[in-house]
Structures are given as structure tokens and as C-alpha cells.
Image (cartoon, rainbow, N blue to C red):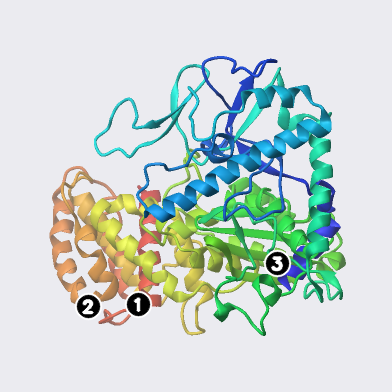
Amino acid sequence: MLLQHLNDFANSRKLFDNLAFRPKAVRWIITLDDAGKLEGRGLVETEGEKRRGKEFDCPQTMGAKNSGGMAEFIADNITAVFGLDTDPEKSMPENTREKRNRNNRCKYDNFWKQIEQACEETDSQALRCLLSFKPEPGQPPDFLRCGVSSKNKPGEEPAWWITKADGQEVRLGPDNFSFRVGGQLLLEDETHIRPFWRKQFEKENKDREEDAPRGLCLVTGESNRPLALTHNPKVQGVPNTMSGAALVSYEKSAPAFSSYGFRQSLNAPTSIQAATAYCKALNWMLHREDHSILLGQASCCFWTQNETDATSSWGALLKQADPKAVADFLKSPWGGREREILQREQFHAVTLAGNSGRVAVRHWMQVTLDSAEKNLRRWFRDLDLKPLRPPSGKENMPPLALFRLACATVREAKDLQPEVTAQLFRAALEGTAPSLTLLHPVLNRLRVDIARDGGMALLNHSRFALAKLILNRNRKDNIMEIPERQNADAGDAAYQCGRLLAVLAEAQAKAHDYKLKGPGVVERYFGTAMTSPASVFPTLLRLNRHHLDKIRKSDKYEGPDRFLDLDKTIQDVFTKFNCFPRTLNLHAQGRFAIGFYQQKARDRATR
């Protein structure tokens, strides 16, 4: 079903119109004069995201490139352009190194052979100049060197270094190169180069179809169609994949992955056109913010069947969750669209994660657009929680952004697993309840951060908003629902114990004129109080008597505001439950944390 809907998407959006080209980042431009000589002292760096370079509409070949020997036309990496290994100092067995060197040479020969062929067929002066520049294979030009940086840091591994046009030296990454000749960027030459490649691509596809076996396509249901042995183009942009990865692939040398003597992707027969269509559809969405979002180690794509712009703002809502944009969406999500159309329209979403050369589908969903809209509205309402302090507006990412919510479960963003983001993506658009076990790492991080950072840990509003959503969506009938603001009258013992700890902490802080040095009751006892209230609260209440006495005797707190209603609040908490629970289960621990947070927010507002 997934491949079928992706195939329909590619056809409905007419993605085959520009199939010979695809967006690709090119970081380095080799600038040549009319004689094929390098202009300036080095290369020109294009401006792009994360030092990958600017994206250009680059020629793409449908041939398999992972095994080596095949290069892209006019724009490729250091191996294709110069015949140089990307990691020449890497230790490997001699036979492996020999094979790698052969593949590198084949890729270099293929790159320049394509340019020679284009020059013959187009009689392009720019390509003749480019052939004059053609470097010797394996011989780095003057602007390339292999070694350590000029700073010679201890333990630094050798790498390739590039000299830029301004003389600055920069470490080479997995970057692509292309050429500018006589002021003309060859990637944008519509006179000779791009028309040549369109004809070449069409011929390449025709030859591929003629040589392909024929049979029934499982995606379209059509018979006697040329079947793809490998599905191309590769899917680009999924985390933890190489330069490209396959959604459908089979190991040709492993019998365990074959059936009835079929080889490679003939085990899941798909026509060349359908395979190209679904890959093109995924690549198109993965490069557009209105159809995909990147969430740590996963990419989530979404689309509708007919209403092309119906979900154009949803990616930004989930990725950035700008408060004004969220408020506007909750007021008027559709801007005049008829409800009947929304109830018929289908909304599709898929969550993808990478595993080296393969792409794994973590989740696939299909609901009506009307249901997805209602679920997204419910998502933001379930996350609504009065913050400890108003947002400063200086955050790089608002607290309710989906990625930031997911990061509340881990110490660092790099530890985030695709399963977590997939669960939250489903919860936002499908209305499901994230697993209650997801609350465990959230509370663990809270416990650790409070012990280390004290009250600063409470400024992570994402953590408590996510906890509220998990608790309410996993709530049973006899358990309290977590409100947006504090519910001081709730009869839930866990929630009230959380409030009580916050009040005791406020009394201690006030007794020390809010200048307490060293860990206080929260830093020392939060973890134990959250899991076993009965073992710690009697001790804390005895300690609190001294804090109240100190406040009473202080000259700083006179008038009706003398105790900040601390004693009254403590007595009020005790009227809501009978005794301290011995232990709290995971759900109750979450209610304890929310009760603590909301009481802290109230105390801060009162101050």
C-alpha cells in the first residue's frame, strides 16, 4: 500500500517531468579560464547548510554506484574528479585496498569518459576547456593535500585539505565538486550540457528497460512490465544512510533472501517506472519542509491525495511549534475549505530511519484529513501546561516542538532513538497514546537533573508538557486528569505529595532569604519522595518546623504576608489525602512530578 500511494503521488505531482536531474549539494566550484587553467589560488566554496554546500539541480544516473565504477555527470566527489581515495590512510587488508583502488580508478575513468562523450556530441567549447584541465589519476592538484592541519593537533588523523580562493585551508568532508568555465557554471548550461544529459538519461532508461526481465508489477498490478533488479534512484536524506539507500533491496548472494530462484528485487517484482516513481516521491518530499520533518535519527514524510496545499504548514507546526502559529491553527486550521472534502480526503504519513545502505519504515499511517486535523489540534491541547516562567523568546526551538519534546527523554540529542520520534509523530497525527514506558526516561532525566542542577532543571518545560500528554492519554477512569493549571482540590495522593514537596522547598528557601548555599530538600530528596513518599516526608515535615520558626522570627517578613501562606497551604494539602503512600507506580510518579512543577509555578507567580 505504501509504495502504491507513493507511486500515485509521483504521478499526480508530475515528478517525472524532471527525472534526469535531482537536487544535490555541491560545495566546491573549480573555476577555469577559457584555456582550462585554474583561476585564482584555489577553489570557490558555495554557501549552503551545514557546510555541505549549495544545492543545485544536478544530473543523475540510474546506474548503481555503491559498488564503485560509476560516476555522476559533471558533479561528483574527490574520487570521481581526481581519482583519489577519500581516506587514503585507512588501514585495510592488501587485497581490499587493491580492489578499492581499482574501483576508484574505474570511477575516475567513467567520470571523464562521460565528459569526453558530451564534448564530442555537443561540440561545447567549455567542455573542451574542461578536458584541458583533466588531472592525472591519483595525483592531487596544488589546491589539495593529504595530511594533518597546520596546527598539528596531538592524535589528529590525516585527511584531505583544500585551499580556497582566498588562501584559507579547509578540511574536506564528503563533498561534491563541479566546474565553472569562462564564467559559466556548467551545471546551469542549458545550451549544451543539460540538453545532452536529458537525451543521455532517456537512452539509459530505454536500454535499461529493454534488458530488464518482464512480469507482473506488484505496485500497479500491470502485467508484462519491465521489472527493476534494483530500485533507483536511491532514497536521499534519511539519517544514518550513506550517499543513498534503498527502501526495497535484496542481497543477491544470500539464498536466505531469495524465493523460488528469483534474484535481487525480483523477489518483490516492481516495474522500473513504479520503482522510479516511489523513490522520486520520497526524495521530493524529503527535501521540502512542507512535506517532511527531520526528527533526530528519523525522517517523517506526509502528504495528501488531492488537496496539495492542505498540510503545507503542518511540518512547521510540528518542527517549530511557534506559539502564534499554533494559536492561529487552533482557531482556523483550514481557512474556508469544505468539511465534506476534508472528511473524504486521505492523509498519509511514513516515518523512515536509516541503517547504512537500507531505509527502514518505522511507521506508516493513513487516515482522513479531517481526523488528522482533529488529532493535531488535540495534540497541542494535551501539551498545554502553564510554564514555570514565560518563554524568553530567545530559544532556538520552542518547548512544544516535536524534536525538543523527544529530546526530553534522553541526555543528548544523539542518543535519541527513531522509535521515540515515531511514537510522538503518531500521537500528533493519529491520536494514539505514547507508551507509558516512555515516561520512565523522562522521570529519570528529571531526577538526575534536579540532583545536579536544582531548580534549573524545572526550566525544561518540554519535559513536563510531554509528561502531561503521556499521563492523560494513558489515564484510567479512576485516575485524575492532569489540568493545564494547578488543581489544588485534586484528591490524588501522588499529585498532592508533589505539591507538598514544592511547598516545603519554598519554606526552606524563604527561611534562608532565597540565598541557600548547597543542596536543599529538593536536590536531596526529590528522587526518594517521588518513588517512596512515606519514607521521606515525615523527616521533611520535622525539618520544616525549624524553617517556619525561622521565618516567624525574621524581621523581613511582617504583615499579613508573613508566612506566605506556607503553613496554611501545608494544612490544605493534608486535607486532600489520608496518608503518605508507601510506593508510587510509574503513572503516579508522573503525577507527583506534575504536582511539584505546578506548585513551583504558582509559588513563583506569587513571589
For residue 545, which quarter of the picture?
Answer: bottom left
Image location of residue 87, percent across then percent down: 43, 43
Image location of residue 125, percent across then percent down: 77, 22
Image location of residue 93, percent across then percent down: 37, 55
Say whether residue 548 is left or right of residue 358. left
Residue at the disc numbered 3: 229
Disc 2 residue type? Ala
Image location of residue 583, percent across then percent down: 28, 80
Q: Are marks 2 and 1 in contact (CB under 8 Å)?
A: no
How crowded is the residue under tag 3: few (<14 C-alpha within 10 Å), some, or many (20+)?
A: many
The kind of secondary structure element at disc 3 is loop
Earlier-in-chain disc, 2 versus 1:
1
Name the residue at 68% across, 78% down. 262
Q: Are marks 1 and 3 in contact (CB under 8 Å)?
A: no
Name the residue at 54% across, 69% down. 423
Q: Nearer the viewer, residue 341 or 242?
A: 242
Q: Quadrant of the N terminus?
A: bottom right
Earlier-in-chain disc, 3 versus 2:
3
Q: Is residue 342 above or below residue 312?
A: below
Residue at the disc numbered 2: 534
C-alpha distance separating marks 2 and 1: 11 Å
Q: Mark 1 against mark 3, which lies toward the viewer?
A: 3
Name the residue at 71% across, 70% down. 2
The kind of secondary structure element at disc 1 is helix
